[in-house]
Amino acid sequence: MKKFKVSSLQQPEYSNDTKRIKKALAENGYEATLEDCEEAWIRYSEGMAASWLGLPESDDELLDMVLLYMAEKRIGETPIPML
């Protein structure tokens, strides 16, 4: 049986950014849903008085920002360990 998943992204216009966050995490051994990635970036952006900040050019910088924020806010089912 094939499963359909209806996206529950709050900011679908930024889905490419959300996918890039997920990819950066996956390439470094972390698993997160698109929704977790989006939530982390929304919260990070709101902390900087923005609704959605542009992602940094460097995936390494992006990874550092997202990991720190996800660990602090315990986004996702299990906390991601700090590096």
Image (cartoon, rainbow, N blue to C red):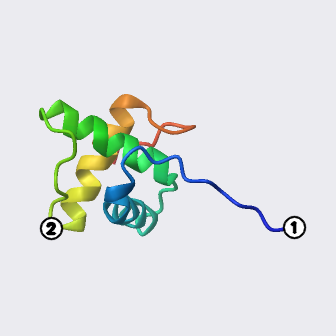
Residue 47: quarter of image: top left
Which residue is painted at 50% across and 52% down in the image? Answer: 32
Q: Quadrant of residue 51?
A: top left
Measured along the vertical axis of the image, is residue 71 above or below residue 23? Answer: above
Marks 1 and 2: in contact by CB < 8 Å? no
Q: Along the polypeptide, which appears first: circle 2 or circle 1?
A: 1
Residue at 24% over, 38% down: 44
At x 16%, y 56%, the residue is 54
- For badge 1, the amino acid type reads Met
Mark 2 or 1: in front is 1
Indicate the quadrant where residue 16 lies: bottom left
Residue 80 locus on image (x, y percent)? 45, 43
Q: Give the structural element (helix, strand or loop) at label 1.
A: loop
Residue marked by disc 2: 57
Residue at 38%, 47% (x, y): give it: 38
Give me the C-alpha separation between circle 2 and circle 1: 40 Å
Q: Which mark is residue 23?
A: none
Disc 2, SS: loop
- Please give the residue where the numbered disc 1 appears in the rendered image: 1
Badge 2 amino acid: Glu
Tell me residue 82's x, y (percent).
36, 42
Q: Is residue 62 left or right of residue 77?
A: left
Residue 62 is situated, as x and y percent measured from the top left of the image, at 23, 57
x and y, in percent, of residue 5 in the image: 65, 56
Label 1 Cα neighbours within 10 Å, binned few <14 / some 14-19 / many ≥20:
few
Q: Which of 78 and 54 lies nearest the eye of the viewer? A: 54
Q: Is residue 43 left or right of residue 3?
A: left
Q: Is residue 7 above or below residue 24?
A: above
Q: Please say if 26 is above or below 11.
A: below
> Label 2: few (<14), some or many (≥20) within 10 Å?
few
| 34 or 64: nearer the viewer | 34
- Position of the N terminus, as image quadrant, is bottom right
